[in-house]
Image (spheres, rainbow, N blue to C red):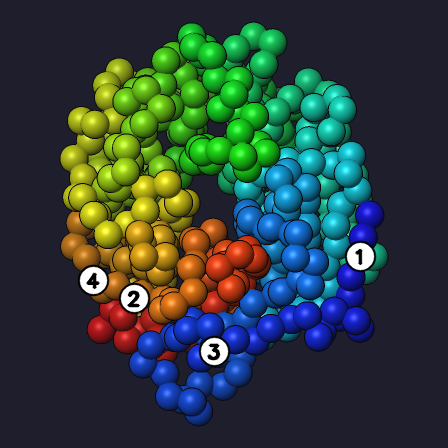
Amino acid sequence: MIKRTISYKLAFTLVIILTLGLVISGCKKDEFKPEESFIKVYNDQDGSRNYFPLSMQRASDEGYLVLSAYNGWNIHLLKTDKVGDLLWEYDLPSKYINAVPNLVERNGNLYFVCMDAVGLFSYVMQVDENGQNAIEFQQFQQIKYPLYVADNENAVFIQTYERSSYRTGIFQLSGAMDQVVNAGSVPIYTDVEDKIVDHLNFTGKRFPFFLSVTPENNYIVMSGFNNYSFSTVFMDANLNFSGVYNGAAFDGGVNAILPLGGNQFSLARFSFSNLYFNPSATLSPNTIDIVESIPAEGKAELDAQSPVLIKNVSIQSSDYVVYLATTKSNQLLLSFYQKGSSELIGTKYLGQSVPLKACDFEMTADGGLMILTRVTVMGSYNRVATIKLSKAELEAVVE
């Protein structure tokens, strides 16, 4: 258990703009106040550490909590203030491993899901802002190998790999996250043990496991292992199987999906090294089909093996669907679409000479956008970084 605070960590926090080439294009030096637009890299003098940011959530004080993995499945927390300055960071004890996206907010407190190193069961951990650490909130012995967590405010859903029965499971927790209220699963008919191990340990392909709830709360959609492939599965409100879009074995599937309401979804799908976007796809939750049948536009410049994030964003009272992806030249690309339409309104590239990888993003309290990314410093050191775009910068993209 290691807790590093700002008192002796400040010297390790790098604020790098021109020197690392992480340029927010179109900004003059004094055009924005420091809190409106910034780039910050959180360095660690331990050269043996390798970070992979997993999720970010705005805290009640308008600062940000970042959940990361390091050196495999070890867990790291980092807290910043609203201008990105480091307040504290904390390494969880070695008994807690495999934190999964996302962070969950309840009554001003932040929570995350991880796994026990020996029993392989799941914990819900609560972030303790005063103690600058994380404490056990609840443990669930029956939930093994957690892969992803989703929150729709009324309930929390955890996607799992059920090793003993060779199934992909979904467990529904109560809104208070203190008990399991429902569960469902789908079968896996091929050996995925090595793929799960590589995913959890960051030693091989990271599969884009995903779980979301439709706005009507009538379906849960997830990307995970089913039958003989990496598939997109629909479950009904009782967590019974409803339909599936089967992937091309493990070389094709859906990277990310955002339910828009009805049968409309914004999604990204991959096929080998190719990535495709469809911001207004029509899917049937009751069908059995293949992912390759979903119409989508090819994005040849994007890296299909890096995470893709899709979220709703409001700019000047207009609603947009925004994709965050990584280019093959290791830049970040934001793509803005009119919500419910396939019309591309604008794009914005971030990064120049230092490799970046998309990890997460969300709107800020002042109408800007906070981006969580992994930056590779000096070609060797993978570190956590945040990029803040101002409200004015976002408005300029969609003008």
Q: Residue at x 56, y 8 (%)?
A: 165
Q: Which residue is mark 3?
A: 19
The image shows residue 82 at horizontal and vertical percentages of 60, 71
Q: Residue at x 36, y 83 (%)?
A: 27
Tally of numbered discs: 4
Q: Quadrant of residue 97?
A: top right
| Callout 3 amino acid | Thr
Q: Which residue is mark 1?
A: 3
* Callout 2–callout 1 Cβ contact below 8 Å: no
Inter-mark Cα distance, 2 to 1: 36 Å
Taking the image as shown, residue 111 lies to the left or right of residue 183, namely right
Taking the image as shown, residue 9 lies to the left or right of residue 297, namely right
Q: Which residue is mark 4?
A: 345
Inter-mark Cα distance, 3 to 1: 29 Å
Q: Which mark is residue 348?
A: 2
**Of labels 2 and 3, the one closer to you:** 3
- Which circle's residue, 3 or 1, is located before the other in the chain? 1
**Of labels 3 and 4, the one closer to you:** 3
Secondary structure beneath dot 3 equals: loop
* Callout 1–callout 4 Cβ contact below 8 Å: no
| Callout 2 amino acid | Lys
Front in this rendered view, residue 91 or 148: 91
Secondary structure beneath dot 4 equals: strand
| Callout 4 amino acid | Ile
